[in-house]
Amino acid sequence: MAIDFNTEPYNDDFDEDKKFYRILYRPSFAVQARELTQMQTILQNQISRNGDHFFKQGAMVIPGQASIETIADINQGTDYVKLQSIYNGVAVETFLSDLAGKTIVGTSGVEAQVILTQSAENADPSTIYVRYTNSGTDGATKTFADGEVISTSDGTYDVQALATSSTGKGSTAKVQRGVYYVNGFFVLVPEQTIVLDKF
């Protein structure tokens, strides 16, 4: 939703049909907030016109990258682990977001890095999305097992996978840090990952 700046206290009544391209200031006269706001709008209007000529909405301007990991191919997608809501008397939701970025290890020896967390919602349990980095101690186990206890490598947190159907593949979209052209602005976007399809 666009914000209307042509109201108090901004009073930005810039109208491109008036064809004003500069605001001049007179020495010894106070500068009004309205003049400063209009000057910004004039400059932004010029930048937007230039940007619209060269870039599409959402275009990557300075290195950034968008990628999607889907389950169209069984070897693609993002691995998830559904968690028990409570382990050792501690509610997982109280520290779930702290797991992002941490290395976790299961009792089987399987190791993974947590790339994203999702809080419990409706019937969906608390879930972590992981990238597996090492197989289990037997060399054959590649994913966490149902009911497996999983701990962060630094020993700070412990969780437990659901007893049944705890692992699988989901779909995520990732945007790397970079400058993107959005609504007439060149916006610095931090790295972020969102879930497209949980399970």
Image (spheres, rainbow, N blue to C red):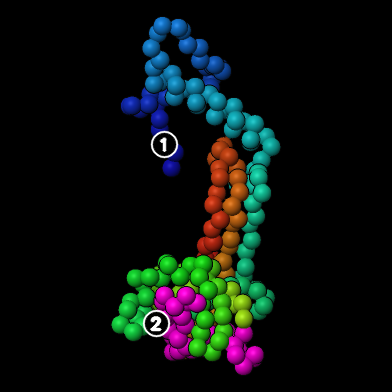
Q: Quadrant of residue 179?
A: top right
Front position among marks 2 and 1: 2
Label ID, residue 3: 1
Work out which residue is located at the far left of the displayed protein and give it. 89
Work out which residue is located at the far front of the displayed protein and give it. 154
Q: Is residue 154 magenta?
A: yes
Q: Is residue 179 above or below residue 16?
A: below
- Magenta residues (range): 135-163
Residues at marks 2 and 1, CA–CA distance in whole angstroms: 43 Å
Look at label 1 and name its amino acid: Ile
Estimate the x, y position of residue 167 in percent, counting from the top left.
Answer: 52, 82
Estimate the x, y position of residue 162 in percent, counting from the top left.
Answer: 44, 85
Count the numbered circles shown: 2
Q: Which residue is at 39% across, 21% downward?
A: 33
Q: Is residue 96 magenta?
A: no
Query: Which type of secondary structure does the marked residue at label 1 adopt?
Result: loop
Upstream in sequence: badge 2 or badge 1: 1
Look at label 2 and name its amino acid: Gln
Which corner quadrant holds the N terminus? top left
Q: Which residue is at 55% across, 43% downward?
A: 187
Label ID, residue 84: 2
Label ID, residue 93: none
Q: Which residue is at 38% across, 24% downward?
A: 11
Q: Is residue 170 visible?
A: no
Estimate the x, y position of residue 197 in percent, counting from the top left.
Answer: 53, 70
Q: Is residue 193 visible?
A: yes
Pointer 2: residues within 10 angstroms few (<14), some, or many (20+)? Answer: some
Type of secondary structure dominating the magenta stretch: loop
